[in-house]
């Protein structure tokens, strides 16, 4: 443990040093514009920071969400601040000073420089009373003393703990700093708002439901009546990118679950509500003319599938889930989803009308039999949305693309796989005109 944390002020003098450690990819313009999702400030990031940091549009959306809450007076703290992006997005939006702590001196320097960059774009007096400390995020007393403060000065604590890479399942014991110890050392410095302290804790998206319940019990053991909101972040690609618990004054008392869906163009859509019961799967195969929709994995994981369906489908339409696990949750409906609604479209990977059933597996050798169904549906493009050998999928897709070039004016479609009573079957679906699969 470092006995004496070293404060780094958020000074423009840091830019030269930061440029040596991590040169900017996007040098600042002469005329700085207000920071936005499409207009991030120029930030210093190492390769590891790029991999681990929260995307800038999500940083801004979270800052907006936090600004809607009734928080106690005080500073924003991140005891493992990394690049500092999320910490200083909070500071800029809330107009409150922040304290970041990093045990790595180079990372701390970059975080401080990034805080100054964000202040340059979205400045306020918060920057003058903000620091990044080179030190141990678990040495709360020393950190508070190093900024010449005392008492309950922390209004919001945000932390994104380190976790092991490439594990299929993560446990709370693998987090650094450990959550229970983190709360224990910082509790004496947490100011409480109307709903308790403001806590935002990033967790592994691979935590089991049992571990999520363990987190809830840990938080409620100290603040039994405080509200809690679970948040899932998705960038598509059939996986959940982040799982976060918002607690106390940082939680949204109107919902216990929400999803932030980040699109490729930087837009972020939010869906929130009450987490529903688990999905019941019905395995009867789809019929031609029905609609198959591959939805975002986070939609089912968050239990917000009914909230989305209420908006996505006409009231009298029928629907059932064919698959709720894995990377491609699959919904069958009698009506086309309202894809013109951006808040519906944001949570859809692909949707299409069932055009035919293929009983032979999609392989290079079986291309001709697959083409019979494809051509009867007048498709010029078919995307494979099914479980295939990752080494073989590019070969199959390439052969399909080559065979379908003779229909340049056809429609787009996709292929999904489903277990039926007579084994795995594959279904060709035709996408609505103007759709763009993700």
Image: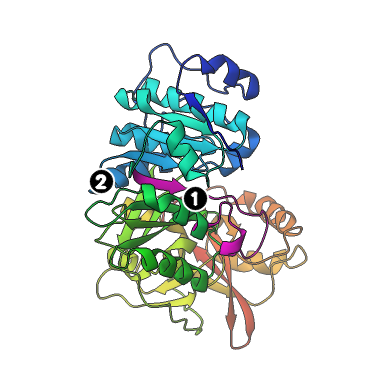
Residue that mark 1 sits on: 235
Q: Earlier in the sequence, mark 1 or mark 2?
A: 2
Using the rendered view, name the quadrant where residue 258 is placed.
bottom left
Q: Residue at x 35, y 61 (%)?
A: 229
- Disc 1 to disc 2, C-alpha distance: 32 Å
Across and down, in percent, residue 185 comes to 47, 52
Nearest the viewer among 385 and 128 is: 128
What coloring was used for the rendering?
Answer: rainbow
**Magenta region includes residue 272:** no
Using the rendered view, name the quadrant where residue 394 is placed.
bottom right
Across and down, in percent, residue 189 comes to 37, 47
Report whether 327 appears left or right of 272: right
Across and down, in percent, residue 343 comes to 33, 54
Q: Residues within 10 Å of mark 1 (few under 14, many from 20)?
A: many
Using the rendered view, name the quadrant where residue 336 is placed.
bottom left
Span shown in magenta: 154-179
Q: Which mark is residue 408?
A: none
Q: Main secondary structure of the magenta part?
A: loop
Residue that mark 2 sits on: 72
Report whether 65 appears left or right of 29: left
**162, above or below 299, in the image:** above
Nearest the viewer among 96 and 333 is: 96
């Amino acid at each position: 443990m470092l006995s004496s944390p070293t404060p780094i002020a958020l000074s423009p003098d840091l830019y030269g040093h930061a440029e040596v450690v991590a040169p900017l990819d996007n040098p600042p313009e002469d005329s700085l514009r207000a920071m936005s999702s499409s207009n991030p400030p120029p930030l210093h990031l190492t390769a590891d920071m790029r991999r681990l940091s929260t995307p800038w549009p999500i940083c801004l959306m979270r800052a907006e969400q936090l600004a809607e809450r009734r928080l106690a007076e005080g500073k924003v703290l991140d005891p493992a601040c990394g690049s500092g992006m999320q910490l200083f997005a909070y500071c800029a939006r809330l107009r409150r000073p922040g304290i970041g702590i990093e045990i790595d001196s180079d990372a701390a320097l970059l975080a401080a420089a990034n805080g100054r960059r964000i202040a340059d774009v979205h400045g306020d007096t918060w920057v003058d009373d903000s620091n990044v400390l080179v030190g141990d995020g678990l040495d709360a007393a020393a950190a508070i003393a190093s900024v010449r403060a005392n008492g309950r000065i922390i209004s919001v604590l945000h932390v994104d703990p380190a976790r092991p890479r490439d594990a299929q399942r993560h446990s709370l014991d693998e987090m650094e700093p450990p959550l229970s110890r983190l709360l224990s050392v910082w509790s004496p410095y947490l100011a409480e708002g109307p709903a308790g302290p403001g806590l935002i804790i990033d967790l592994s998206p691979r935590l089991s439901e049992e571990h999520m319940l363990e987190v809830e019990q840990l938080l409620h053991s100290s603040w039994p009546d405080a509200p809690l909101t679970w948040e899932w972040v998705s960038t598509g690609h059939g996986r959940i990118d982040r799982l976060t618990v918002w607690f106390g004054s940082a939680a949204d008392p109107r919902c216990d679950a929400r999803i932030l869906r980040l699109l490729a163009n930087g837009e972020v859509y939010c869906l929130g509500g009450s987490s529903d019961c688990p999905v019941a799967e019905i395995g009867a195969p789809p019929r031609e003319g029905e609609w198959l929709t591959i939805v975002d994995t986070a939609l089912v994981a968050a239990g917000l599938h009914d909230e989305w369906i209420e908006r996505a489908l006409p009231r009298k339409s029928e629907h059932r889930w064919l698959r709720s696990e894995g990377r491609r949750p699959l919904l069958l409906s009698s009506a086309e989803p309202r894809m013109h609604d951006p808040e519906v479209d944001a949570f859809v990977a692909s949707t299409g009308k069932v055009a035919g059933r293929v009983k032979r597996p999609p392989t290079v050798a079986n291309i001709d039999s697959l083409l019979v169904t494809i051509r009867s549906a007048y498709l010029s493009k078919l995307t494979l949305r099914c479980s295939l050998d990752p080494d073989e999928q590019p070969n199959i897709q390439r052969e399909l693309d080559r065979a379908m070039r003779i229909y340049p004016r056809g429609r787009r479609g996709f292929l999904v796989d489903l277990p039926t009573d007579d084994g795995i079957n594959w279904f060709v679906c035709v996408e609505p005109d103007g759709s763009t699969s993700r």
